Amino acid sequence: QQQVKQSPQSLIVQKGGISIINCAYENTAFDYFPWYQQFPGKGPALLIAIRPDVSEKKEGRFTISFNKSAKQFSLHIMDSQPGDSATYFCAASGANTGNQFYFGTGTSLTVIP
Amino acid sequence: KAGVTQTPRYLIKTRGQQVTLSCSPISGHRSVSWYQQTPGQGLQFLFEYFSETQRNKGNFPGRFSGRQFSNSRSEMNVSTLELGDSALYLCASSPLTGDTQYFGPGTRLTVL
């Protein structure tokens, strides 16, 4: 049972465009939602994270939008650059779920120059 | 601070053998989690250790085991290796259980 569902599996965006990756979850006990960025040959690196008390969080070109009622959250990458080409993972965890992190299956983003 | 380190970075084993992977967390971090990453399955949770105690365990067979030492360093062991165990094994540390996880570069295990 996939606790966190991520889409799309792959995404191709032109340089300067907006990349949007979506995640949905079922367990309402989740209260922490991080996004990770992974380059080939490297481990995932934390990009940005949000808690359900806010609907949006922005850090530079990266924004998380959170919809608690729909149990969905998304990552928006504004002005996408070729250097953003990587695999992105969403995740969720909660104190009431043993603090275990559940990851989406990943989105491979390619930004075309 | 130095990041999470994992050794070895690459490993080739044959079916039936046993392997031990090592993880040194960020200094001061007491929680260490292990994940198996494969192209088709994404990141699959193996187990988490906190203060030398296993807190959570994923849905993996008993061939997969781990432990944590008093200095928070952790090892995971896979016995009787199978071809399907070929994967990138990632270790992540956090100050406390449930905190943001910081990943190491992983150990690439190939089983022939």
Image (spheres, coloured by chain):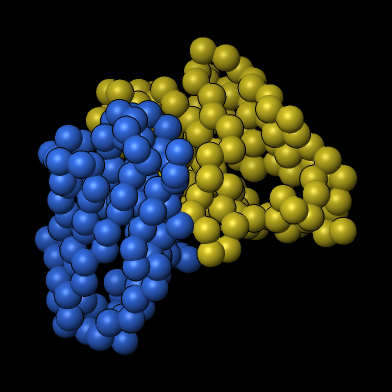
Chain colours: A yellow, B blue
Left or right: residue A73 compared with residue A84: left
Give the answer, above or below, for where B6 lies relative to A70. below
Asked whether B4 or A50 is in front, the reply is B4
Give the answer, above or below, for where A66 lies relative to A61. above
- Residue B58 visible within the image: no
Q: Residue A82 location in percent, x, y?
A: 79, 55
Q: Residue B20 location in percent, x, y?
A: 21, 66
Residue appearing at x 15%, y 71% in the figure: B79
Residue B36 sits in which quadrant? bottom left
Give the answer, above or below, for where B19 lies relative to B77. below
Residue appearing at x 22%, y 84% in the figure: B15
Asked whether B92 or B73 is in front, the reply is B73
Left or right: residue A98 compared with residue A6: left
Give the answer, above or below, for where B10 lies relative to B74. below
- Residue A79 visible within the image: yes
Asked whether A108 or B89 is in front, the reply is B89
Q: Residue A14 location in percent, x, y?
A: 85, 53
Residue A35 sits in which quadrant? top right
Quadrant (top left/top right/bottom left/bottom right) for the C terminus of chain A: bottom right
Q: How many marks?
A: 0
Left or right: residue A90 compared with residue A16: left
Residue appearing at x 45%, y 38% in the figure: B1
Left or right: residue A106 compared with residue B77: right
Q: Residue A75 location in percent, x, y?
A: 64, 36
Residue appearing at x 75%, y 53% in the figure: A83
Most extreme residue toward the front, as rendered?
B1
